[in-house]
Image: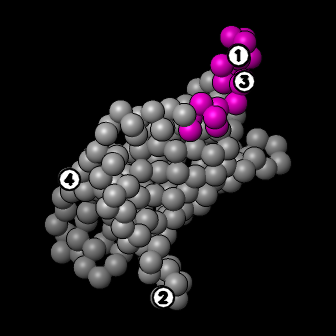
């Protein structure tokens, strides 16, 4: 079963990969670096239509991306969640490994540091996520990214995610990047 999913993923990647990813001259500067800021709306896809927009569910992102050979990206960011109820704040460093150019997919890991109003603090266990998105190049060296995140408690087999898909674990974000 795993081989079947691997072959399907390999076929999709080979169709979506532009030829320049394979035929990039070594002196063309095939690595790009960018810094960015954005927001992540922590409301599951099924709940968005049932509630009014609430800024209390927003997390704020700042990060840096390294894109290699136009297709592989390492995205390191920090997300900050403001206070809510008895939580003073949450800081969440995250690392994503992405594949694609204007349409990208990948996976990531994050760990949350939670500071309570009482002064207690602790690191939560690491969690994982799947990430997919679109990147729209803007004027100059700027880009707008629209992301979808699918949260995971642990890192299961991909076939489990597909068969047990839960819309409540699907959240969205938007980021603005500047490439150097």
Q: CA distance from mark 3 to mark 4?
A: 40 Å
- Residue 150 point in image, percent of width and height: 41, 58
Residue 28 among magenta residues: yes
Other residues around mark 1 within 10 Å, as few (<14) / some (14–19) / many (≥20): few
- Residue 175 point in image, percent of width and height: 60, 56
Q: Identify the residue under disc 2.
A: 51
Q: How is the image coloured?
A: one colour
- Residue 72 point in image, percent of width and height: 55, 31
Other residues around mark 2 within 10 Å, as few (<14) / some (14–19) / many (≥20): few
Q: CA distance from mark 2 to mark 1?
A: 48 Å
Residue 72's place in the image compared with 81, above or below, is above
CB-based contact (under 8 Å), mark 1 and mark 3: yes
Q: CA distance from mark 4 to mark 1?
A: 41 Å
Q: Secondary structure at mark 2?
A: loop
- What is the number of the mark on residue 23? 1
N-term mark: 3 or 4: 3
Q: Nearer the viewer, mark 4 or mark 2?
A: 2
N-term mark: 2 or 1: 1
CB-based contact (under 8 Å), mark 2 and mark 1: no
Q: Quadrant of residue 140?
A: top right
Q: Identify the residue under disc 4.
A: 125
- The answer to whether residue 178 of the structure is visible from this angle is yes
Q: CA distance from mark 4 to mark 2?
A: 29 Å
* Outermost residue toward the top in this view: 26
CB-based contact (under 8 Å), mark 3 and mark 4: no
Q: Which residues are magenta?
A: 12-33
Residue 9's place in the image compared with 126, above or below, is above
- What is the number of the mark on residue 152? none
Q: Secondary structure at mark 4?
A: loop
- What is the number of the mark on residue 20? 3
Viewer-nearest residue: 45 or 86: 45
Q: Secondary structure at mark 3?
A: helix
């Amino acid at each position: 079963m795993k081989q079947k999913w691997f072959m399907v993923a390999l076929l999709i990647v080979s169709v979506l990969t532009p030829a320049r990813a394979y035929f990039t001259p070594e002196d063309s500067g095939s690595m790009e670096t960018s810094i960015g800021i954005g927001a992540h709306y922590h409301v599951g896809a099924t709940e968005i239509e049932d509630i009014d927009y609430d800024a209390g569910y927003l997390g704020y992102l700042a990060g840096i991306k390294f894109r290699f050979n136009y297709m592989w990206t390492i995205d390191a960011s920090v997300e900050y969640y403001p206070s809510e109820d008895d939580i003073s704040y949450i800081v969440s460093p995250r690392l994503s490994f992405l594949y694609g150019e204007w349409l990208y997919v990948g996976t990531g890991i994050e760990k949350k540091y939670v500071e309570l109003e009482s002064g207690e603090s602790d690191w939560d266990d690491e969690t994982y996520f799947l990430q997919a998105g679109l990147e729209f190049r803007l004027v100059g060296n700027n880009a707008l990214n629209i992301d979808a995140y699918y949260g995971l408690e642990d890192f299961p087999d991909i076939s489990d995610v597909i068969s047990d898909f839960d819309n409540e674990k699907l959240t969205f974000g938007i980021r603005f990047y500047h490439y150097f």
